[in-house]
Amino acid sequence: MAPKDLKELKTQLQEFLDRGFIRPSVSPWGAPVLFVKKKDGTMRMCIDYRQLNKLTIKNKYPLPRIDDLFDQFRGASVFSMIDLRSGYYQLKVKDVDVPKTAFRTRCEYYEFLVMSFGLTNAPAAFMDMMNRVFHEFLDQFVVVFIDDILVYSRTEDNHDRHLRIVLQALLENQLYAKLSKCEFWLREVVFLGHVVSAEGINVDPHKVEAVMSWKVPKSVTEVRSFLGFAGYYRRFVEGFSKIAAPLTKLLQKNVCFEWTDARQQAFEKLKEALTQALVLIQLESGKEFVVYSDASIVGLGCVLIQEGKVVAYASR
């Protein structure tokens, strides 16, 4: 480990010790440590739990579908974002499982008393806890995705009441937010890579920039990565599956990687489609929906419309 990384490691370990997150260990387990650079340039200590994760019985608790979360807003016009401080570290590990979280550094050996990043069941366990905390308010004025909490309301008066309820729930369950990362009383909010407002839902402009600067894939792995990123916003793109078909074919077994003109055109067309994506309206329950569909021997497509405006596209 480089001297600079070693100094940062000692600093972070001391902070974890001071906060009661870790303790010295004599466990037979022991995962290696590595550093990952964060967006702000600081380094995050990560534990390589791959071997432990292989032996772990997987928690099948479902993470919410992004589309389902956005369908809840129903005419909301005021928003607040609450980000928990080091969310995973607010969940304790059972005493019997603490030794399994052990990790080794060059000269020292520690184990986590709180849930560490990198554990395969961490997202599911944390999502389960958050849903238990807010179960009364989900689908009413709260959307939760792991440690991100979005409070939404139709009016400012309602929002004041909803915020107080959410903050009280956090207080009662001893969950703490990071004030510098929270935003309150917004008319427009960026949530899970989307921009949400009273006018509807749109693609985050920063994500569009990432798509536009995406380099031409040189392997199947890079094609899969691009399609995974673009597919996250497929509801915004009419005929997504048809446009992406030349690229999708590369993911099939026994298909050699060959970057043809047709695939280059599909790549460019998908990027262009995402930059020109429509603002999708927030659906309103109780109002009439219209579905327009079209099908052929190679696929199908449809669009969901409410009051003459697009709610979502779908294709396969």
Image: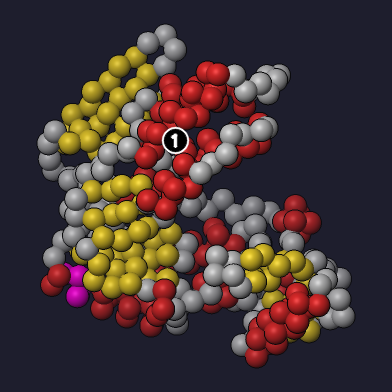
Q: Quadrant of the N terminus?
A: bottom right
The answer to whether residue 13 is visible is no
Judging depth in this view, the residue of 139 and 190 nearest the camera is 190
Q: Quadrant of the C terminus?
A: top left
The residue beneath circle 1 is: 271
> Could you say which quadrant of the image residue 258 lies in?
top right
For label 1, the SS is helix
Q: Is residue 169 magenta?
A: no
Q: Amino acid at mark 1?
A: Lys
Splitting the image into 4 quarters, where does residue 178 fall? bottom left
Q: Position of residue 48 (x, y in %)?
A: 74, 62
Q: Residue 59: tell me if it is visible.
A: yes
Q: Which residues are magenta?
A: 158-162
- Secondary structure mostly taken by the magenta-highlighted segment of the chain: helix
Please provide percent x and percent y for residue 16.
66, 83
| Residue 282 image position (x, y, % from top left) | 22, 47
User: In screen coordinates, is 157 left or right of 26?
Assistant: left
Residue at 77% x, 68% y: name it: 33
Q: Residue furthest top?
A: 297
